[in-house]
Amino acid sequence: MNKIFKVGLIGCGHISETYFKGHDYFNNFKIIKCADINMETAKKCAEENNIEACSVDEILLDSEIEIILNLTIPKAHYEIAKKSLENGKHVYGEKPMAINFEDGERLLQLSTEKGLYIGNAPDTFLGGGIQKSIELLKSGVVGDIKIGNAIFAYPGIQSYHPNPEPWFAEKEGGPVIDMGPYYLTALVNLLGPAKKVHGVSTKVFNTRTIGIGPKIDTAFKVECPTTYLINLEFESGALIQITLSFDVIAHQRNHIELYGTKGSMIVPDPNMFGGSPLVCTADSEEWIAHSTEDMPLGKTNITSESLRANESSTRANYRGVGLSEMAYSIEHGKKNRCNGELSLHILDIIQTAMKAANSGESLDIKTSCELPSFFNNEDISAILK
């Protein structure tokens, strides 16, 4: 039987609901206390989930808490992660690791010095969709990947989020910081580390209007580029064109397409856990689906209407597996898969891509990383209820 780690949640926004649902799937963590910069928000979260609310300082100093779950807004990720490590606690956070590379480096160094674990979302690459895609690539069915493309494009969150301003703010906003981690983490796990990037960016609308909540019909200023067209070169030699945009009403392109020397692959939505990779080779001359419904983290568990472009109404969502896998790794002295080195490499790509788009130059990625091992059924079964 696994040890059940006691987790303290900081940041009680909408995403916290998903992590509480993780209690239904995973056997080795329990969120027992929560905190937020707004105490009323923390109290509401505590009441809804039958746990204790406390201040941010109280939860950081609480000797009962072993892992801090950092679900604050991106610009607060570094500060909370740093304080967690300084207070002797492992930390698992939402993406990105930080909003600038130097802070990410400091966190990784601090975790090493303290002998503590640091983990970061996204953990969606641990799901059936990406893991099945990795398995197919390793089998050689489509040969060596040479080129490909990826896209995330939709109108932005202002129509359905009551406080959308941070997504359009100067230093923490934009689609590369928001959705880039899902696509970049998937691509790195599929193709290996990246080494060079260049691109362009634009801002289509100077203002946006809030469509819901107490500030409905309030206009606010867009302070950052809202569309990036990125060319990413990998150490393997693969070249991938990536579109990340808050300016597209709808589209019908696939999330990720990879083109190899023997065939092509369509990779499922990297923002979710399931979906069927599709493969077409010269031998088959048709797209063959490889279902993930028989995989523990690939089974559909959501049926809903989606407002996002090209997002399926049936999905698999097992967020929290990264936290659970980190807890298991702590107990057994293993390197966690959503680890700091991978997260820092993704942050490096994010920041370098944004700089390259701003400058018009082709820039080198400073870091590399060791790829996480395949997440097999035995590994998954060890942490499932």
Image (spheres, grey):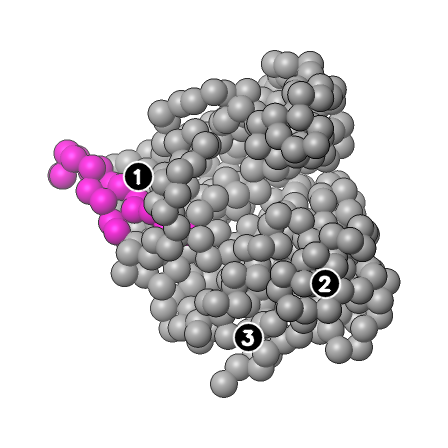
Camera-nearest residue between 367 and 58: 58
Q: Is residue 266 left or right of residue 331?
A: left
Decide: few, some or many residues near mark 2? Use Cα within 10 Å; few <14, some 14-19, many ≥20: many
Say which quadrant the C terminus sits in.
Answer: bottom left
Q: Main secondary structure of the magenta part?
A: loop
Q: Which residue is mark 1?
A: 265
Q: CB atoms at circles 3 and 1 under 8 Å apart?
A: no
Q: Quadrant of residue 210?
A: top right
Q: Which residue is mark 3?
A: 28
Query: Which percent across, then down, holds residue 70?
Result: 70, 56
Query: Which percent across, then down, holds residue 314?
Result: 35, 45
Q: Which residue is mark 2?
A: 34
Decide: few, some or many residues near mark 1? Use Cα within 10 Å; few <14, some 14-19, many ≥20: many
Of mark 2 and mark 3, the one earlier in the sequence is: 3
Camera-nearest residue between 295 and 40: 40
Residue ID at (53%, 81%): 2
Q: Three-letter amino acid code at disc 2?
A: Cys
Of mark 1 and mark 2, the one earlier in the sequence is: 2
**How far apart in space, not on screen, are marks 1 and 2 (Cα)?**
42 Å
Q: Is residue 344 left or right of residue 3?
A: right
Camera-nearest residue between 220 and 121: 220
Q: In the image, is residue 274 part of the stretch drawn in magenta?
A: yes
Single out the mark in the foreground, 2 or 3: 2
Q: Three-letter amino acid code at disc 1?
A: Met
Q: Can residue 72 be seen by looking at this rendering?
A: yes
Callout 2: helix, strand or loop?
A: strand
Decide: few, some or many residues near mark 3? Use Cα within 10 Å; few <14, some 14-19, many ≥20: many
Residue ID at (58%, 55%): 17
Start and end of the magenta stretch?
A: 273-291
